[in-house]
Amino acid sequence: MRLVPRGCPVNSLPVEQFRGPIVDAVRSHACVIVEAPTGSGKSTQIPQMLLDAGLAGKGVITVLQPRRLAARMLARRVAAERHGKLGDEVGYQVRFDNRTGPRTRIRFETDGITLRRLHHDPLLRDTAILIFDEFHERHLYGDLMLGLAKRLIEHDRPDLRLVVMSATLDTAELGAYLPGAAVIRAEGRTFPVGIRHLPPNAKREKAPPWELATEVLPEVLRDAPDGDVLVFMPGVYEINRTLRELQRIPVAKDRLLLPLHGQLSPAQQDQAATPGNQRRIIVATNIAETSLTIEGVTAVIDSGLVRRAGFDPRRGINTLLTGKTSQASAAQRAGRAGRTAPGIAMRLWTERDHAKRPAHETPELLRVDLAETMLQLKLTGIDDLAAFPWITPPPPQALQTAQELLTVLGALDACGRLTAHGWRMASFPLHPRISRMLIAGDGQQCLPTLCLIAALLQEQNILLAAVDDRVRARRLGLVGDTPVSDLALLLAAWHYVSDRHFQREAGEEIGVHVQAARTAGELQEQLLQIAESQGLDSYEKQPEMEAVYKAVLTAFPDHLAVRSGGDRCSLSGGRRGSVHPSSIVPREHALLVAADIQETGKGKGTVEVTLSLVTAIREEWLEECCAGAFRIRRRIFFDAVGGGRVAAEEQTCLGDLVIRSRRLANVTSDEAAEVLAVETAAGNITIKAWDAKVEAWIARVNLVATHCPEAGVPAIGAGERTALLAQICHGALGAKDVKAAAVWPVLQHWLSAAQTAAVEVYAPAQIRIENGRTPRIHYDDPAGPYIAMRVQELYDTNRLPTLCNGAVRLKAHILAPSQRPVQITDDLARFWGESYAQVKKDLRGRYPKHEWR
Ligand code: ADP
Ligand code: MG
């Protein structure tokens, strides 16, 4: 279905034109895809249309939102449009904030909340219609929920209705994923937007976005004087910096300066969303890209940056990273200036940079670590993630990495099943490392400190690197003389600025980024709320630091390192690394866990890493904290350096990393024989008695085995050689014993008497030829057995005997008197007839004393 609005009435939103088709489509289709531009009324109107048409029956219309702020604001708006109280007919639920009630029929919620709801209500019984809003953003949980919803419709909930909405959709991909879905596409009214880029100038490109935005503002206000200005910044910090800069410039004097982001009060958020009398400059996160429409904007200033979830390999967790936006996202942002009148969009990057940007955002699924997702799905009863109906399947390597991490964290057992710990971890809306860490701190008088550590790890490093010596010394003075962890310094520095209300001067005194520290504090509060809501005991008077360090170890067992000398370390997976010079942990601590690991290169088959935020670990903690990966094993080995003896040691390991080895006294003779046999087979030990005769015997056995299978003689291959060696080495304790070991007694018993007799007959050591001589047969040539004789010794012989009952022709190496071969042949008669005359001519002169017939 393709519908284009015809002359929209001024006071009605574009989707209003499609009320009939939308209601009909949802009535008759399990899945409906709605594509309409931002501001058409999708989020606020469609849920109401479906409710008013009675399509939800007695059930709830659940609207999934990728963002908390959008869920809250949409619920408030829709409740107001329906003249109701928030939490009555219309409500919302986001993390830490539930405004729904028993009468709620339209429920806006973040997709993470819906996913968790599935744990105790796997069929989503209360929901009649599930609406996926802003699906083009391709958040991981949106993808995941759509897969789960698709399965629900196909199996247990054929009555459930799905509506997938977005401003820009790849409807072809989605249509193929939801076969039979009705597609409704509404085209909006937009005005032209003039797009401007920064002129090519490398210097300006590197300036902070708030400076660039301030620089371009006069031009923007000159060319678009009548409307509001919308500025896109990646996060709260950049928004605040921008507002501060803008306050200083005269052209912005008569404008109302407003922030718009998720951490504001509802009143502040509404103020930014609703136009007033005064002209405004709104500085927003990408919430204003498509989630919320601000009326009256005629100019956009776009930093071209976004804070999005991604995997940070340094800390081994998903975190928010600031990066460049895609071309599609830039086009959306620019479009915000052309809703009500022609506008302009000022991009704070060059055209050259623009051309290099990706066309679209990568789905979050392909950017983040999937451990948390895997845990969530396991809890929902979905064990095989490779078989899950993904709209975009994750790379198999990503699934394997997730599985390995969950196993080492003890959330999954060796068969990939959820453990008791895993069940508990899955109920936390956090990365499994962090939930594992908080669980470890339960009732240990350290939970708030752990929450702070988790928060500090998620944020950018609060400790500034470029500080002068006086500042550094002041900072170091915050911890005692014998620090065991870099985290202690981080915590002390945070407390220092927190006690001084995050004032800039306090930060400058000890080189701390106060804004990052403040954000970490807020995050700590949230984490603590989660921990408490999960029933963890968070009492802490004086943090129990040993418990803190143990908990950190449980969260990062794969970041354990053993110092091998100085700052060099070994890690699991054959990785090698060194401790970052900023670490304050003294070198005498041999066992460390790093909260931050940075890959710095790849050497000969090994990965080179730098370890930061390290903590000294005591060996006895390993078994307690990392039960899933801890083991003690007995290793038997050949000690080539220590006298060539077989030795045993007890290795304490975490995964494949050997933490410590202890020499053991006793090695059983079986163990010794096995190791020595392997060393001998590898050529590291030579048995004196294993000479050419032995090899000849083996060659004879193999010749018979190959050519006279009826004799029943088994061949001696690599495996049999090792078995022979193990028998020869039996009773030996070191290389010396093996060198002197007897070989023949073992060989003699290898074959039965009948088999030995068959070898003697079919592949004898010597053989009688026509002239009565009995030369030895050589078996060392892969081309076949031969005799080697001087010409004179072969006189009176025209035919050579055969071996193996006629199956193998014997060859003759015919030698000159000097023992140099003159010909190799298996046809002596021909030699005498064709070649002998010439041979005689050549040799007679040189060897006149010999007989020449
Ligand atoms: P869409 O989802 O298609 O982008 P919405 O349903 O969010 O559209 O918005 C439709 C209209 O309602 C827009 O013009 C927008 O300005 C207005 N609107 C939505 N939410 C609010 C709000 N909280 N305050 C003021 N106006 C709003
Ligand atoms: Mg919307």
Image (cartoon, rainbow, N blue to C red):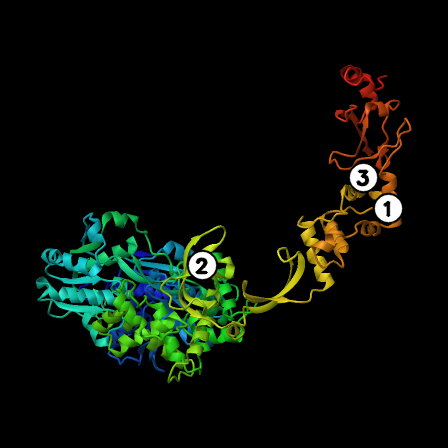
Q: Earlier in the sequence, mark 3 or mark 1?
A: 3
Can you tell which quarter of the image residue 584 is in?
A: bottom left
In the picture of the structure, the residue carrying the numbered disc 3 is 707
The three-letter amino acid code for the residue at tag 3 is His
Q: Residues within 10 Å of mark 1 (few under 14, many from 20)?
A: some
Name above or below for residue 375 compared with residue 813: below
Query: Total of numbered circles in the picture?
Result: 3
- Queried on whether the Cβ of the residue with tag 1 lies below 8 angstroms from ligand 2, the answer reads no
Q: Is residue 596 above or below residue 51?
A: above
- Label 3 sits on a secondary structure element that is helix
Residue 294: in sight, yes or no?
A: no
Which quarter of the figure has residue 285? bottom left
Question: What secondary structure is marked by label 2?
Answer: strand
Does residue 799 lie above or below 99 as drawn? Answer: above
**Distance CA(mark 3)–CA(mark 2):** 57 Å
Residue 563 point in image, percent of width and height: 47, 63
**Residue 640, x across and y down, in percent:** 63, 55
Q: Is residue 147 left or right of residue 9?
A: right
Q: In the figure, is residue 114 to the left or right of 721?
A: left
To which residue does mark 2 refer?
577
